[in-house]
């Protein structure tokens, strides 16, 4: 079944500075939606507003056309990978996978280097390994949609390729909203791509639009 | 450009997402409440409590020791001391562990539930300990 996750009418101010206005994005089951934007344009703020953890002047966030003001209270609808480490450092990998109802053995098949590490606490892992665990559990979380803020940062190229494969498989039953400065990885997997600039989102028609909109040189 | 073609072009732009039309926000419609495993919620709350359990327990033990030694006259002071230390713990954890709240939120446990349950539990333990000490003493 196809679900939709939409947001529009978002206006966000920090003091007298307007960060976001005229925002519209749509995410659907079976699609990966990318958001690119220069630093400080408000990509993370946009995700936080959609998630409900940041108050905006106005917003409309809808799942299947039903308004949800505080999506963070509905992990069955939306999960959110922030750009920083968020898993409590004293939790073991087994505990994390149990909390998210995930199978650790399936993870080990994809990433054999974790075979003997199920009892490790996450603090003992390297920064990249820790990020990989966080990205994996969010992608595989039992939600209809997941927002991923910089999922490819800190990962090595081989891991990025595997994460892209997992995303490709998972999008059959989920929708993803992704932002990352590794724009070639993002454009590689995205079905829809928005560029956020001057507080507004622009839906791109082709890859050259991201240069036109001043995000990157191709 | 006639009216029909203008409408068609506009609807194509809206459908493609290139422009958005801001409609008045509809009244919030609630989904059915999410039913979560109570044991899982309890486990997550205990995990969160673990992050400041040692500090608050030491404070409770110190209060009991003082209460044991000096009696009921210290109750009021100890009561407010405990309240103030809990407020300090709340401020400290809220500042230092702010990133970890995303873990609990992604699993369906809100900040409000985490704080109310753990602080209430800790304060009830403190009161029960004082009452028990008073009876034994």
Image (cartoon, coloured by chain):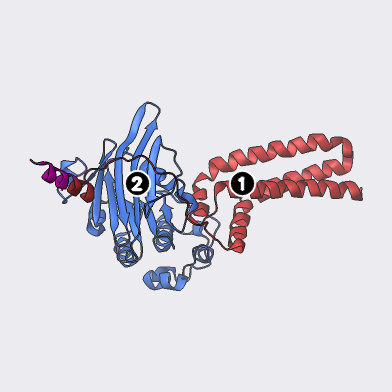
Chain colours: A blue, B red
Q: Residue at x 70, y 36 (%)?
A: B84
Most frequent secondary structure within the magenta stretch: helix
Q: Is residue B25 above or below residue B39?
A: above
Residue wearing tag 2: A7
Q: Cα distance, mark 2 to mark 1? A: 30 Å
Horizontal side, residue A212 vs residue B112: left or right: left
Report the number of discs. Answer: 2
Horizontal side, residue B75 vs residue B12: left or right: right
Q: Which mark is residue A170?
A: none
Horizontal side, residue A33 vs residue A49: left or right: left
- Closer to the camera in the image, B7 or B110: B7
Quarter of the image with the N terminus of chain B in it: top left
Q: Report if residue B8 lies within the magenta region.
A: yes
Q: Residue at x 29, y 36 (%)?
A: A199
Residue wearing tag 1: B115
- Closer to the camera in the image, B76 or A159: B76
Q: Is residue A7 visible?
A: yes
SS of the residue at dot 2? strand
Q: Position of residue A144 (x, y in %)?
A: 40, 60
Q: Residue at x 62, y 63 (%)?
A: B39
- Closer to the camera in the image, A44 or A92: A44
Judge the density around disc 1: few (<14), some (14-19), many (≥20) Cα neighbours within 10 Å.
Answer: some
On the same chain, marks 2 and 1? The answer is no
Q: Report if residue A58 lies within the magenta region.
A: no
Stretch in magenta: B1-10
Q: Position of residue A60 (x, y in %)?
A: 38, 43
Q: Is residue B80 above or below residue A156?
A: above
SS of the residue at dot 1? helix
Judge the density around disc 2: few (<14), some (14-19), many (≥20) Cα neighbours within 10 Å.
Answer: some
Q: Chain of mark 2?
A: A
Q: Is residue A175 above or below residue A46?
A: below
């Amino acid at each position: 079944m196809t679900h939709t996750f939409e947001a529009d009418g978002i206006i966000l101010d920090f003091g007298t500075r307007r960060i976001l206005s005229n925002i519209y994005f749509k995410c659907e089951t079976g699609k990966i939606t990318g958001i690119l934007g220069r630093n400080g344009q408000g990509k993370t703020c946009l995700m936080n507003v959609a998630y409900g953890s940041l108050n905006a002047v106005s917003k409309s966030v809808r799942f299947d056309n039903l308004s949800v003001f505080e999506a963070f209270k509905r992990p069955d609808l939306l999960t959110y990978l922030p750009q920083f480490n968020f898993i409590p450092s004293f939790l073991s990998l087994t505990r994390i996978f149990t909390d998210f109802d995930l199978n650790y053995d399936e993870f080990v098949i994809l990433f054999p280097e974790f075979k003997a590490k199920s009892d490790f606490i996450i603090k003992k892992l390297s920064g990249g390994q820790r990020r990989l665990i966080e990205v994996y559990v969010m992608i595989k979380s039992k939600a209809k949609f997941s927002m991923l803020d910089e999922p490819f940062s800190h990962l090595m190229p081989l891991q990025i390729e595997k994460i892209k494969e997992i995303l490709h498989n998972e999008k059959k039953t989920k929708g993803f909203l992704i932002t990352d400065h590794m724009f070639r990885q993002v454009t590689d997997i995205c079905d829809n791509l928005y560029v956020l600039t001057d507080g507004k989102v622009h839906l791109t028609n082709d890859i050259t639009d991201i240069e036109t909109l001043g995000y990157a040189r191709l | 450009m006639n009216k029909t073609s203008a409408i068609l072009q506009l609807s194509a732009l809206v459908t493609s997402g290139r422009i958005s039309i801001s409609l008045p926000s509809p009244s919030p419609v609630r989904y059915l409440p999410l039913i979560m495993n109570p044991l899982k919620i309890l486990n997550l709350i205990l995990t969160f409590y673990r992050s400041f359990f040692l500090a608050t327990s030491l404070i409770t033990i110190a209060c009991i020791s003082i209460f044991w030694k000096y009696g009921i006259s210290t109750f009021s002071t100890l009561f407010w001391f405990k309240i103030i230390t809990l407020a300090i713990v709340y401020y400290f954890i809220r500042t230092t562990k702010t990133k970890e709240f995303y873990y609990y939120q992604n699993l369906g446990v809100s900040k409000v539930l985490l704080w109310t349950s753990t602080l209430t539990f800790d304060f009830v333990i403190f009161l029960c300990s004082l009452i028990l000490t008073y009876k034994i003493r």
